Every structure is written in C-alpha cells, then in structure tokens.
Amino acid sequence: MVFEDLRGFLEHLRGMGDVLTVQEEVDRKFELSAVLRQVATGEGPVVVFENIRGFSGIRVVGNVLGSRRRVTEALGSPGGELLETFISRRNRPIEPTILDSGPVKEVVLTGGIDLHRLLPAPVFHEKDAGPYLTAGIAIARDPETGQQSMGIHRVAIKGKDRLGIFLANPPLAHYLARAEKLGRPLDIAIALGVDPLLMLASIVKHTPGDPDKFVVAGGLRGEAVKLVPGESVKVNVPAFAEIVLEGQILPGLREAEGPFGESTGHYFINDSPVIQVTAVTHRRNPLLQVVLPWAMEPDLLLSLGSGSEVYAGLKALAPKVKDLALVPGTCTFHAVVAVEEGASRGEVRRIINLALNLDRRMKQVTVVDDDVDIHDFREVAWAVATRFQADRDTLILTGLDSYVIDPSVQPGGATAKLGLDATKKQRGDTADSYEKIRVPGYARVRAEAILASTLRQSQN
Ligand SMILES: Cc1cc2nc3c(=O)[nH]c(=O)nc-3n(C[C@H](O)[C@H](O)[C@H](O)COP(=O)(O)O)c2cc1C
C-alpha cells in the first residue's frame, strides 16, 4: 500500500487503533513534549493534538514513526527484516513527477508572515531557547551542479519570518559552503508533514553522484513522489506536504542558535546559519509534524538512515556480518554487530575497525555471534558479560574525526572509539562452554500449547 501523504498514513494507522487523539487543550510549551515523552517508548501510539492553546485550524502530530510496527507498516513489509527491506528498496530508483500545483498550495502566504502565530511549534525542554521545528525536511540545490538534496535539520523559530538552522551534515552543509564561496544566498525549502517513506528517504546518506533523495523515496515507495515548484525559491517541494516554509539562507551570517535538547539527550548550542523566510504554503487545516528528540522515533529514523548505510557497507566488505543494530538512546554512537559463528579474532577486529570508521558518529561497536539476538539488549549484555575479557578483547582507536553534538568531545577535537569482541573464543577444554542454554524444541512447542489452553480456560 502506497501512502500519498501523512494523512493517508494516519488514516491507515487509525484503523489499526494506533493513533491517540488528544482533545484536551495542551500548551505547546513543555506540555506537548511531556505527553509525547510518556508514550515515546516501546511501541507507544502516534499522538494527534487537536487543541493547542492559542491556535486554531492547525493540529500537531508526533511519534509517527516511533515504533518498529509503524515503520514496517510504512514499508509494507510485515514480518520482513527492516534493514534488508530498506536497503533493497532504496536501490531501485524512481524519478519524481513534477506537477503544476498540489494540496500544499491550498494556502499561499508571501507577505505579512508571522511564524509565531502560524505554527504551534513546541518548546520541548526546560532550557530550550524557544520553539523548534524538529520534523522539517530541509531541501536545497547544489549551487554548482543544480542537484537537489535534503535532510532533517533542526530549525529554531527566531522571529516572525526568521529561522535558525543547524547544518552539521552533508549534503546541505556542503551546498551552503559552495553558495557562500560564490557570495550568494542559498534557496531552501522546509517541508513538514510528508508521507512516511519520503521522510525516511530524506535522511539516507548522500554522497556526490548519488541520485536526488526524491528518487530514493520513489524507490522506497515503489511509486514516484509528486513535487511542485516552490513559490518563491528554485526548489521543488513535495506536493502533498502539510506545510512548506520557503526562504533563503543569508550568506556568511551566523547567529547563536540554541540551547536545544538534542538527540544526544543533552543541550547543544551552536553558531548557525539564518533563513529569511520568503513564503509559507500549506494545506487547509494542516498538521504540524514533530519529532521528539532522544526518543524511540529518532532512534528508528537513525537506524534506517545511518544504520542501514553502515550495515550495507560492512556486509559488502565483510560477508560474515549478519545483522547490525544501533543501541537505542545513543544517537547512533553505539552499535552491535552480529557475525557468523566461527569468525576469527582477526576478522572480528577488522569488522570493528570498519564499523567505527564507516560513520564518523560511531563511537562504540560490540561484535557478538549470531546466536545472540542483537535487538534484545539483555542478550547483548549477556554476551559481553560471559564471552568478553577486557584485556584480551578490547580495541581502542584514538584521534579520530568527531561529531559536533557529542558533549564528551572538546569543540573541534578528536574522538576515541571502542570496540568489544564479545564473540565465543576457544577455551581449550572439551565441553562447549559457550552453548546457550535452552529446553528442547518439542518441549517449547508443548509449552506454547499448554499456555494457550490455560489462557483460554482462564478467560471462560
Ligand atoms: C531526527 C533527526 C534530526 C536531525 N537533525 C539534524 C540537524 O539538526 N542538523 C544536521 O546537520 N543533521 C541532522 N540530522 C541528520 C541529517 O538529516 C542527515 O545527516 C542527512 O540527511 C544526510 O545524511 P548524511 O549526513 O549521513 O549524508 C538529523 C537526523 C534525524 C533523523
């Protein structure tokens, strides 16, 4: 099933009982994020806020991709391996279709814009500098090649028509650097509330020569994404987005942006570029989508965006790699890799080195055998506790490229990285000391039958 827009996806999820609608009045300052924080663990539902204090005609939606079940629904791959499905789909390019107009143009504002009155952007955390947009897909063109690309970037609402944007990552950080070299402003559009696969495509890695991420989105969807030309900028935007903010990044200008509670779970302040807003277009009664930082949703987005990239890279270079999971809550800094049983110590060390270097964000990699369920962190902790010796199985790398939002690194400084080899090692005795305890298969089948009939009896 292909979802044309966020509304279609929400309708589908509503049918599955996976949407919580809050009718009670909620303040966008702290209350909204506090409600999201309560549900944003495990498999908590999508939350739609119908009534935001001081606003009418606009709703806020959060936690849309905050569960594996919903990501699986979006991909339409029930029971499938998420990473494998994601990787195979993203490699079948489908070009976007450009329309003359679309629902995102139902309302067009090019003058008298006041973002503080238009958008109930939440103030998420106690010490945040102000309201932030956290689900905005920033879209721009390479000033040299004209190639479009995009990414999710945090956006501070700094004034009626003025935004701050945190651009640490390529490709947009590169586009701005090129525009500034030419002394030109950079046209930019920020799309809020798009179909779930377009959102996922927006954060895949983009290296020069890669297709436009809208082409990747088409592949994930199995159907072309529909775009419309921007109203005031030379950028194409999703025709079915809920809201699009258009503007120009002013060349050479940096202003304090933050503090803002980041996906590290810590506040981060930066000198960031500034956007002068030139137009706002939106659907009637739009939905403002938000992503709660340091929660299940960004964990899942990052697992697919960055995790799938590291996994595909590792598998290509080390075929014994079986699976990869990013550790929730670690902002892509920690990963667990499963390898085929019998990988040699040298192979495991190579895999650790590769994983720590494929993504500069990765700071700790634990390698386990594939009898460990790497999506169950109890099992991973068990493997480290029982198959790992600190003096024998630790690898430390130093002086590597760091990630700007990591608070443990000095600004501009290098980072150290850690690898743990928690795979089985020969102990020299005859018994298989590492065999995982379990009951025989026939007894497990029998146990399921016993429990099912006991449950039926207790319900009667
Ligand atoms: C929830 C979320 C928030 C993000 N916020 C930012 C941000 O504020 N600034 C930034 O540079 N990158 C941010 N990113 C990462 C970029 O979107 C991502 O790096 C980019 O799309 C391309 O990936 P690449 O840098 O691996 O090529 C965020 C990602 C996610 C999932």
Image (cartoon, helix red, strand yellow):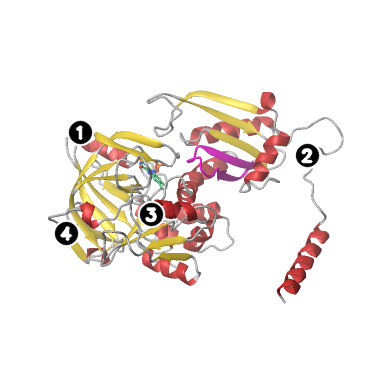
For mark 2, what is the residue? 434
Mark 2 lies on a secondary structure that is loop
Q: CA distance from mark 4 to mark 2?
A: 66 Å
Query: From where the camera sits, is residue 5 visible?
Result: no
Proximity of marks 4 and 2: CB atoms separated by less than 8 Å: no
Q: Using the rendered image of the protein, determine whether residue 161 is visible from the camera's viewpoint.
A: yes
Give the labeled residue for mark 1: 252
User: Element type at marker 1?
Assistant: loop
Q: Secondary structure at mark 4?
A: strand
Magenta region, residue range: 321-338
Which residue carries the number 3 mark?
Answer: 32
Q: Position of residue 358 (x, y in %)?
A: 49, 36
Q: Residue furthest left?
A: 111
Marks 4 and 3, the one that precedes in the sequence = 3
Pick whichever of labels 1 and 3 is earlier in the sequence. Answer: 3
Instruction: State the residue in front, 258 or 309.
Output: 258
Indicate left or right for 334 with 459 as reference.
left
Q: Where 452 falls versus 411 (above or below)?
A: below
Instruction: Determine the CA span between mark 1 and mark 2.
Output: 59 Å
User: Residue at image x 81%, y 37%?
Assistant: 433
Counting from the top left corner in percent of width and height, residue 13 is at 46, 67
* Camera-nearest residue between 295 and 416: 295
Relative side of 320 to 95, left or right: right
Q: Which residue is mark 4?
A: 109
Q: CA distance from mark 2 to mark 3?
A: 48 Å
Residue under the point 50% across and 32% down: 357
